[in-house]
Amino acid sequence: MTRRYAVVGLGHRAQLYIDALLGEWRDTGEIVAFCDTNRTRMAYHNLRVTAAGREPVPVFHPERYAEVLSLADAVVITTIDARHADYVCAALDAGVDVIVEKPLTVDADGCRRIAAAAGSSSARLIVTFNYRYSPRNSAVRELLAAGRIGRVTSVHFEWLLDTIHGADYFRRWHREKKNSGGLLVHKSTHHFDLVNWWLGSSPETVFAQAGLRFYGQSGAEAAGLPRPARAHGAPGLGADPFLLDMTADPRLKALYLDAEHEDGYLRDQDVFGAGIDIDDTMSVLIRYADRTAMTYSLTAYSPWEGYRVAFNGTRGRIELQVCERGWTPPHGAVDPSALDDTGGFERLTVQEHWQKAEEVPIVNGAGGHGGGDRLLLDDVFRGAGDDPLGRQAGYADGIRSVLTGVAADRSARTGLPVNLSDLT
């Protein structure tokens, strides 16, 4: 039986789910409502709907969210992070299933509210952690589950965002912590969830240091550069690699530049501008319930993009090295997968004590994240089925990852370790 879906928040991320329901997963359901503060963005997505041969989807302002819920069996929530909790809780209270982008919410209060609503609702909640479905990350889970390195004792995890992808968080609504929780919540929640899932454990104590060391006004002052407030209309737009020209990307232009007159949202603010209060350099130490210790770092201004993670165990070591792009040209595509010939690679090895290192093959599929996006969408729209890796994530998984980031942010501000139990 097909299901009725409403999409709440019609920015860039919504397209993954809209295209799925117009394409390969069209047999699983239909879109019955769009809900957003901006009619221009909803109209953009409706053009995609009619181009696929469907009737336009009815559009609603968030003030009419109760009407949206009355039409739908499930809502797909892709709004800014700070609004997730309100939309999630209202849907659960109405008995409507929820599919929500990570992070589940941005603070401990949102976690408490969602936990209470989920605990008293018959509806289901799925958090779309697509990194779990990437073949390389699934392969790590399989090696750990098979006991190849025995009991894990420590994890070392470094994530690098380059000066295209990383910079983009400092142009958008993410640049204000009240909207995104900062990168320790918005971005690192992905990484913290991966480790929780890989280990099958939960974080207990977090200590962190973080700061704004590259972007923001201090970065501009250090370089001695006068900066425009935004890219559009700025002199030198084509020469400055930190200025985003939305007119060069038809989708960005249609979704944001052409929609500014409605809500004043600027998608191309200067990364060295005023008002940025999120960090770009983060180091975290985490102790887990099973006594595993992790060192983690996130840098948002690297010349290359990717990550390294290593697991030390009582029988050996696993290492995963991923380079999503080895370099980025000025004004390159924001999405790392959109550029070819940038030196990307991935390598997974396992080395047991007294043995040579063994390279483990990674079998990728078609589509984003090595075919992981297709697997995620199958889980979302067709059901998880019997997945031995347990990749579908629920609200408890979302809460654990968010609270890890919240604890890290609090620790970085106070200089003290934070116990997650104190947040809940």
Image (cartoon, grey):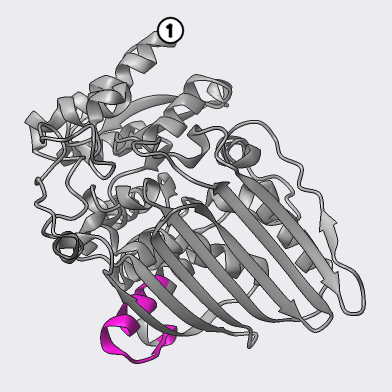
Q: Find residue 58 and report its image quarter.
A: top left
Q: Position of residue 319 (x, y in %)?
A: 71, 66
Give the left or right position of residue 423, taking residue 178 as reference.
right
Q: Position of residue 100 (x, y in %)?
A: 42, 48
Q: Nearer the viewer, residue 80 or 311?
A: 311
Give the left or right position of residue 388, taking residue 246 as reference.
right
Looking at the image, which residue is at 29% across and 34% down? Answer: 10
Q: Residues within 10 Å of mark 1 (few under 14, many from 20)?
A: few
Disc 1 marks which residue? 53
Q: Nearer the viewer, residue 229 or 135?
A: 229
Secondary structure mostly seen in magenta is: helix
Looking at the image, which residue is at 28% across and 35% down? Answer: 68
Q: Is residue 196 magenta?
A: no
Magenta stretch in the rendered image: 405-421
Looking at the image, which residue is at 29% across and 41% down? Answer: 241
Q: Position of residue 101 (x, y in %)?
A: 42, 48
